[in-house]
């Protein structure tokens, strides 16, 4: 998949015709190691601005509320594009409150999916994309930027549209729950979203509609089901799981009480992850049919500490039903600490549950990866050495525009108990 990324915070500039927003952006892979190079020579992009003035009673603001948009082409060989979108007349720079999205026109319009530049989960799942659609060639993750009082925050927002399984009030199609994830403008591994996180989130949200599929990946056996995420980054996987858990539980005949999802990562991820948790809580509170009653928390957890059994108070307090992680196995050097942390979480669970005669304690881990290099296979030797059983439960092809297709693999790891 490719991602639209700003190279610097967007700016408001004066021009002869009034104010314009200027956005210098690129389109690269998640790792930023190659630029989008479309096979057909170019892809069409829309840059659209929407007034986000808070007060609907402000009639002047209401008058200028119409969407401003212009079109650009991203051509093979391009590395940056400097887009300018004209803003509404009569504005002073300091009074500009608006949202600007950049997205490819290939993205299908979705019913009830209102935010600009949302990527629907179906756009990355091959079995949801129609034969003739250009999305078959690969998706481009749109980006949205917010101006408040003329200043653009140094974050971009990625919007993931999940089908909720509820029918719209007008009896229309499936309602869409739009989860928003802030990520940094600039280089940082922990403060960006990555392909395996996006694809696995999309897969889990989609699998909710099939009892068989969801039971295999998210089996819910108790009403206080709890999930720990390692290396959560901005939180896309854990937050998506928290948002779909009530639906997943209902499909399995369970009603959740005190369900929890704990995101963990290094300290540098904390600010973005906490901010995304707060955004999600606001979204879910507006959609009480969805995950409002699942607690989402964050705590720092460095695998170098975790492998020694040293956990923060939240991670240590619970025998976790499920541990999840995505795109955390690309660096061979950190694999021993990561696998050591999984084993230490298993040991902590055994200590918590101390089941006596009722048999050994079992731990389950959902691990998603987009294999990037053969050195990553060292993971499986380490897992074997520490008595983890593993199997692939889903492989999802990930087409990439102008390049070789990739794949996201979802593994189930199990240790202890009766392993099937
Ligand atoms: C490629 S990112 C994936 C982020 C997220 N899971 C996703 O799919 O978008 C890898 C994550 O692992 C985290 N990480 C790397 N080494 C770590 C360590 N020693 N302890 C805890 N987290 C670590 C990074 O901070 C980063 O957030």
Image (spheres, rainbow, N blue to C red):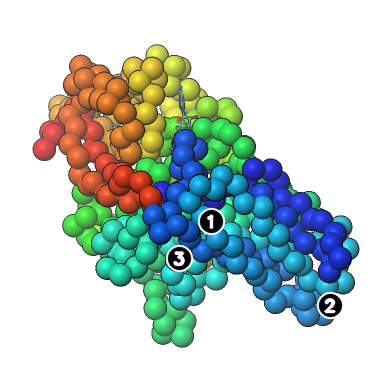
Say which label, 3 or 1, has the lower sequence index.
Answer: 1
Q: Are marks 3 and 1 in contact (CB under 8 Å)?
A: no
Q: Which residue is mark 2?
A: 60
Residues at marks 2 and 1 touching, judged by CB atoms closer than 8 Å: no
Q: CA distance from mark 3 to mark 1?
A: 15 Å
**Quadrant in which the C terminus is drawn:** top left
Mark 1 or mark 2, which is nearer the start of the sequence? 2
Helix, strand or loop status at disc 2: helix
Residue to which mark 3 is pinned: 107
For label 1, being within 8 Å of ligand 1 is answered no
Q: Earlier in the sequence, mark 3 or mark 2?
A: 2
Q: Is residue 140 visible?
A: yes
Q: Position of residue 353 (x, y in %)?
A: 29, 29
Q: Which element carries disc 3, helix, strand or loop?
A: loop
Q: Nearer the viewer, mark 3 or mark 1?
A: 1
Foreground: disc 2 or disc 1: 1
Residue occupying the far bottom of the picture = 170
* Residue appearing at x 20%, y 44% in the figure: 393
Is residue 362 depicted above or below 160 in this figure?
Answer: above
Q: Could you tell me how many numbered marks the image carries?
A: 3
Q: What residue sits right under mark 1 in the picture? A: 74
Q: Nearer the viewer, mark 3 or mark 2?
A: 3
Q: At 66% from the left edge and 49% from the top edge, which residue is drawn?
A: 24
Residue 412 percent coordinates (x, y): 23, 38
Residue 319 lies left or right of residue 362; in this view the side is right
Disc 2 packing (10 Å; few <14; some 14–19; many ≥20): few
Q: Secondary structure at mark 1?
A: strand
């Amino acid at each position: 998949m490719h991602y639209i990324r700003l190279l610097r915070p967007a700016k408001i500039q004066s021009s002869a015709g009034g104010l314009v927003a200027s956005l210098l952006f690129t389109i690269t892979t998640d790792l930023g190691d190659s630029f989008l190079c479309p096979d057909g020579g170019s892809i069409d992009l829309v840059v659209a601005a929407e007034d986000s003035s808070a007060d609907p009673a402000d009639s002047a603001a209401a008058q200028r509320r119409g969407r401003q948009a212009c079109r650009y082409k991203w051509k093979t060989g391009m590395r940056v594009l400097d887009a300018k979108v004209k803003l509404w007349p009569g504005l002073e720079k300091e009074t500009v409150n608006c949202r600007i999205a950049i997205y490819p026109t290939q993205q299908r319009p979705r019913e009830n999916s209102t935010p600009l530049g949302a990527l629907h989960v179906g756009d990355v799942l091959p079995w949801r994309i129609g034969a003739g659609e250009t999305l078959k060639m690969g998706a481009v993750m749109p980006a949205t930027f917010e101006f408040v009082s003329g200043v653009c925050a140094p974050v971009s927002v990625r919007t993931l549209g999940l089908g909720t399984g509820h029918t719209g009030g007008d009896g229309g199609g499936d309602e869409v729950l739009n989860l928003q994830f802030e990520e940094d403008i600039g280089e940082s591994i922990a403060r960006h979203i990555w392909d395996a996180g996006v694809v696995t989130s999309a897969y889990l949200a989609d699998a909710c509609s099939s009892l068989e599929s969801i039971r295999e990946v998210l089996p819910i056996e108790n009403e206080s089901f709890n999930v720990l995420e390692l290396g959560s980054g901005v939180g896309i996987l854990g937050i998506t799981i928290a948002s779909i858990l009530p639906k997943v539980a209902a499909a399995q005949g369970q009603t959740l009480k005190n369900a929890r999802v704990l995101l963990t990562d290094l300290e540098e991820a904390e600010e973005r992850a906490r901010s995304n948790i707060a955004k999600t809580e606001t979204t879910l509170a507006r959609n009480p049919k969805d995950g409002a009653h699942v607690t989402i928390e964050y705590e720092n957890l460095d695998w170098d500490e975790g492998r020694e059994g040293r956990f923060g108070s939240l991670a240590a307090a619970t025998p976790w039903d499920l541990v999840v992680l995505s795109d955390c196995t690309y660096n061979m050097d950190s694999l021993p600490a990561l696998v050591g942390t999984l084993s230490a979480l298993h040991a902590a669970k055994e200590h918590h549950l101390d089941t006596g005669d009722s048999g050994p304690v079992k731990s389950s881990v959902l691990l998603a990866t987009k294999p990037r290099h053969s050195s990553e296979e060292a993971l499986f030797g380490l897992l074997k050495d520490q008595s983890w059983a593993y199997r692939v439960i889903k492989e999802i092809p990930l087409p990439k525009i102008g390049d070789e297709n990739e794949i996201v693999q979802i593994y189930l790891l199990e240790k202890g108990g009766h392993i099937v």
